[in-house]
C-alpha cells in the first residue's frame, strides 16, 4: 500500500510540475498593456486628496498603500505616486498595467476623471478661502 501511495504521489508531483510549466509558458505569451501619465501639481495636498479619493473609489479592491498606492483589479493593477523632477517640480505619476487594452484605457480614464475632479475641487476651495 505504501508503494502505491508513493507512486501516486510521484505522478501527482509530475503533473503539478507540468501544469506549472504550462502556466508559465502561457503567461510569457500573454501581452501586457502599459499606460502612463504624468502631471505637474501645485501642492502636495492635491496628491494627498487624490490618494484619499482613489482609495474611497476602489474601497473593495486589494490595495498596497506603502510609499505609492498600488491597486489590483481583475487582470491588472494601477499605481499612483508623487515625486519631484529634475527641476524640483511636484509631479503625480499614474501607471496602469493589465492584460486588456480596453480595460486599461477605461481604468486610466476613470483615474483621470477623479484627478480632474480633485483639481477642480481644490481650485474652488482655494477661491473660497482666498
Image (cartoon, rainbow, N blue to C red):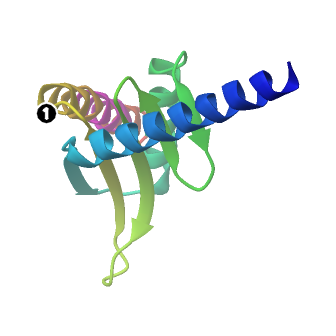
**Image coords of residue 126 (percent x, y):** 39, 40
Q: Quadrant of the C terminus?
A: top left
**Image coords of residue 57 (percent x, y):** 45, 19
Q: Quadrant of the N terminus?
A: top right
In the picture, residue 60 is in which quadrant?
Answer: top right
**Residue 100 relative to residue 43: left or right:** left
Give the total of numbered labels.
Answer: 1
**Residue 73 relative to residue 6: left or right:** left
**Image coords of residue 122 (percent x, y):** 37, 37
Figure check: 88 above or below 126: below
For the point 38% across and 23% down, the residue is 74
Element at badge 1? Answer: helix
Could you say which is closer to the camera, residue 100 or residue 59? 100
For the point 40% across and 33% down, the residue is 125
**Is 117 in the magenta?**
yes
Residue tagged 1: 101
Residue at the extreme right = 2
Residue range in magenta is 113-122
Figure check: 18 above or below 60: below
For the point 20% across and 25% down, the residue is 103
**Residue 85 relative to residue 33: left or right:** right
**Is 9 in the magenta?**
no
Amino acid at each position: 500500500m505504501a508503494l502505491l501511495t508513493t507512486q501516486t504521489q510521484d505522478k501527482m508531483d509530475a503533473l503539478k510540475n507540468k501544469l506549472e510549466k504550462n502556466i508559465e509558458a502561457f503567461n510569457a505569451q500573454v501581452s501586457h498593456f502599459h499606460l502612463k501619465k504624468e502631471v505637474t501639481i501645485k501642492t502636495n495636498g492635491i496628491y494627498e486628496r487624490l490618494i484619499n479619493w482613489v482609495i474611497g473609489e476602489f474601497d473593495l479592491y486589494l490595495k498596497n498603500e506603502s510609499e505609492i498606492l498600488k491597486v489590483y483589479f481583475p487582470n491588472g493593477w494601477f499605481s499612483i505616486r508623487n515625486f519631484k523632477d529634475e527641476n524640483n517640480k511636484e509631479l503625480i505619476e499614474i501607471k496602469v498595467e493589465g492584460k486588456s487594452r480596453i480595460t486599461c484605457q477605461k481604468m486610466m480614464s476613470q483615474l483621470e476623471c477623479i484627478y480632474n475632479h480633485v483639481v477642480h475641487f481644490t481650485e474652488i476651495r482655494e477661491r473660497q478661502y482666498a
